[in-house]
Image: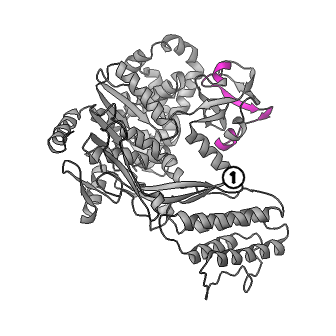
Amino acid sequence: MSLKRFVTPSIISILVLSFLYITGVDRIATGKNSQEVNLRKYLEVQTKIIENHVDKISIQELFANSMRGFVRNLSDTTLDISGTPLDTNFTDLEITSQRQSYDKFERAYLFLDNQSGDKEDMDKRMEDAINAMFRPLDPHSVYIRPEISERIQDEFSGKFEGIGIQFQVLDDTITVISAISGGPSEQLGILSGDRIVEIDGKSSVGFDEQDVVRSLRGPKDTKVTVGILRPGNSDLLDFEITRDEIPLYTLDSSYMLDEKTGYIRVNRFAATTHEEFTKAMRDLRNLGMERLVLDLRGNPGGYLEQAVRMTNDFFPRGTSLVATQSRHARFTSEYRARYNGPYREIPLIVLVDEGSASGSEIVSGAIQDHDRGLVVGRRTFGKGLVQQQYELPDKSNIRITISRYLTPSGREIQKPFHDGRESYAYEIYSRDDSATGDVSEFIRNVPDSLRYKTSAGRIVYGGGGVVPDHIVDLDLTNELFALMRRNNVGSTFVRDFIDRRGSEFRSEWEDRFDQFRSDFSWSDDQKNDIVQRLKDSGLVVADTVTTAHFKESKLYMNETMLEEQLPSPFGFMKADLARQVWGNEHFYPVLNDEVDFMVKTALTLWPEVQELKTLRSEVSGF
């Protein structure tokens, strides 16, 4: 059992699979007056697909799929639909126009509504029909429920309205990881480690993350009261918080890796990304940055325009950055650098992995195709499709793929999706655990038609993400780290440490973060406590074990293996401590110091970056 199987899903899959919103069945409207909304919604969805999808879609297939979805989850399982407008035994079906499709579906809808009375939730049946209509399309064309649409808009607009905390649900209790700087919770003195056990006078114990968001987010200037249990204080503390606009930052961290090297980690491309990136670059230059490591690992993309603007910053005016190709002329275009990028001369390394998708692949693809910098890491996700979002009458949305994008060399990096949406989404987990093995297997199967050349004549590949110039394998040997993450040992240990020694720790270290990075280490007693917690979570240490391995819920290893693998869990817990005391932006500097092998590798590759620059200047002149 490898580390990848446990760590990758928990870190990456939420980001990557966010493109594949699997919708539920919450109610949209109530009563018979929803007929008009639902039928209008059906017509609009079908129209948008036919008029905008990158591929030509059969109206008959859309209708047939929508009908199968419509009747798939009928509440009345005894209802005989044979010979009725609901019959999906399409032996002689012939739909040649959208008018025919709509008329047939309308008859089916009204028939079911009249037959079922109040027994059938027609809003849910309509959502079933729409979801089924999308099933034969590409995996990024999706239906998005109204409440999910609102959250997505918040995340990509760069702000939301709420109380301003980062939280985690631990042992059924809302635990504050940190109060967002400048937000209403920080201003009231809410601290990391605080437990929110009541919201507006009612218990919040047992809430999941959606319950928390639903309860604590809300319009600016509205109020919510939270009851907090604070470590070291037996009394319940009540805070009345006035919600406010809370910025959502897309740069997780920016700092100097060494005297010359800046580091920026971007978690997605939202409305504020380029603005944040520009500020971070300016600050790093003021600190003496001469070269940059741009970390796009786990970045699923977002706004194409923001990815293009960031890419532009590394190239001279007029350079080809990306192109979109569609059967519709209005969705076909080429994006070139509109200005001379302020960082077009800075030595550059871009870090990517299987969680890097869409906008991340636009940036790394252009950097690689023009030999502008070194792409380092693991093969990216492979999302080369561009979506347009359309709002429906009930504030739900549909996202439709309108074009494919091509990197400057002309390659399409979209991976195949003909085996179904689930297979497509989880393809990254079926790859060879070794990044080198994965790339070797991928290249062996790439046809000549998908082999391209960079500006300097290097071979690059299409059809399945961006293959890095320098491959870096995961540290797959640390099963102990996997056990820690799977059982939440690290977070609970750090939380308990803050409960017991938070005031003492802050007094000693809070104004000395740089010294914390270099000098802090867990005491022998604390390390022994961590090991005991790992044993309580399934670690079995025995001299007779020759190979570390999982069996059911237990991890078996010998004492030598334990000593070899312990530095990674210790380092992660140190990084988590930094996050809870100083905020999320301080997590990555410590994690990179203690655990991140890819960052350490990148710092040794500047000679390769220089070789690439020399090759580029000899061939292309810039």
The image shows residue 463 at horizontal and vertical percentages of: 34, 60
Q: Is residue 300 visible?
A: no
The image shows residue 186 at horizontal and vertical percentages of: 63, 21
Which segment did they paint magenta?
Answer: 185-212
Of 469 and 492, nearer the camera is 469
Compared across the picture, whether 202 is left or right of 605 comes to right
Q: Quadrant of residue 406?
A: bottom left
Residue, x 67% and y 67% (percent of image)?
43
Compared across the picture, whether 442 is left or right of 576 comes to left
Compared across the picture, whether 140 is left or right of 360 comes to right
Q: Secondary structure at mark 1?
A: loop
Name the residue beneath numbered marker 1.
395
Q: Quadrant of residue 107?
A: bottom right
Compared across the picture, whether 595 is left or right of 173 comes to left
Q: Quadrant of residue 112?
A: bottom right
Residue, x 69% and y 52% (percent of image)?
395
Q: Amino acid at mark 1?
A: Lys
Q: Quadrant of the C terminus?
A: top left
Q: Is residue 396 visible?
A: yes
The image shows residue 469 at horizontal and vertical percentages of: 25, 46
Question: In this rendering, is residue 422 above or below 518?
Answer: below
